[in-house]
Amino acid sequence: MIEINVGVLLSITPSGSPDAIRDFACRLADDVRPELEHATDARWIFHLQEPDRLSNENVRRPADFLDEASLRMVEGPFDLTLVITDAGLASRKQRVVAGLASEIARVAVVSTRKLLIAPKARPVRTLQDESVRWNAADLVLHLLGHLLGLDHADGAGHAMATYRFDDERDRCSRFEPGALADLRKRAAAIPERIEGTRGWWATLSFHMRSAGRHFRQVMTPLWRNKAILLPLTLPSLATAAVAPTFILVFTAEIWDVGLNMPPQVVAMFTAGSILAATW
């Protein structure tokens, strides 16, 4: 049977309780494991890591957890990483959300703070509440579904339906039957290791082959984030320094080449610089 190892990172604010978050994470793993194993036909193992204390109570963005999550993923080694934090979590649109996932980085982040916020005239929720328990489980299933490459689905009761907190929820949602075959195929491709590579060339070849197999995953963030415009936001001095760098790389006759360079070659180097900086 395929084994999928998930590293569970706990990032706790100065006022947070490590024991409460740890108990919450253990229960959460137990709640989502049966549906994940049924849907993917794989064995899911959740590895709880030592809590990491944040420096302040500020709202975080997913990128704030990326370095630590990536390091733990390599050291584990883990196939996926789930970050559970009691800090607020902000999306790219500056909205405070309960959870976010990056299919490229294979990292999902869940914020308990958002789960505990109750509507007006309702009592404050706690991590021990049944509604928090099952809504958190539903959210984690949804995020892990995204990490496995699934898109949103219509219909209540499906794990990939648009997530909303439901006070009446008392069980996990299920992945829709029509997606199970695709889900199992995607889950089988999740465990990946760099094995038997020797030297920088073999490692580079591994990553180039991986990029070729996942071309859409590589190109989508570049297109979505308008990466082609990023080099143009650099300070003018840094931007101007890029073109001579290419000349230095390809020829030692910098003055002769630079002073006698025709306009079309300048345009070519400019385009090459922008594309290289984009990647």
Image (spheres, rainbow, N blue to C red):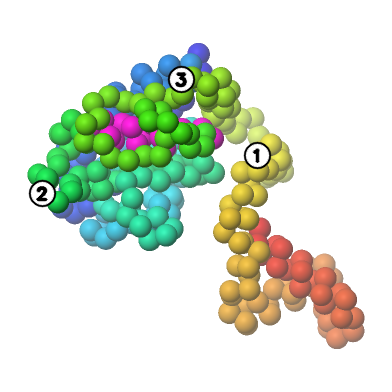
Q: Which mark is residue 214?
A: 1
Give the secondary structure at mark 2.
loop
- 158 within the magenta span: no
Q: Amino acid at mark 3?
A: Ala
With respect to residue 272, does 218 lie above or below? above
Q: Which mark is residue 121?
A: 2
| Crowding near the residue tagged with mark 3, few <14, some 14–19, many ≥20 C-alpha atoms within 10 Å | many
Give the secondary structure at mark 1.
loop
Q: Which residue is mark 3?
A: 39
Query: Looking at the picture, how far across and down is residue 276, in whole percent?
Result: 70, 62
Q: Nearer the viewer, residue 183 or 198?
A: 183
Stretch of the chain drawn in magenta: 133-149
Residue at 61% over, 62% down: 226
Q: Does label 1 or label 2 sit earlier along the sequence? A: 2
Q: Does label 2 or label 3 sit earlier along the sequence? A: 3
| Crowding near the residue tagged with mark 2, few <14, some 14–19, many ≥20 C-alpha atoms within 10 Å | few
Which of the two discs, 3 and 1, sits closer to the camera?
Answer: 3
Residue at 26% over, 48% down: 114
Q: Nearer the viewer, residue 6 or 60?
A: 60
| Crowding near the residue tagged with mark 1, few <14, some 14–19, many ≥20 C-alpha atoms within 10 Å | few
Horizontally, is 277 left or right of 89 in the view?
right
Query: Looking at the picture, how far across and down is residue 208, in whole percent?
Result: 70, 43
Q: Quadrant of residue 225?
A: bottom right
Give the secondary structure at mark 3.
helix
With respect to residue 85, does 245 lie above or below? below
Q: Nearer the viewer, residue 226 or 274?
A: 226
Overall secondary structure of the magenta section: helix
Horizontally, is 216 left or right of 32 in the view?
right
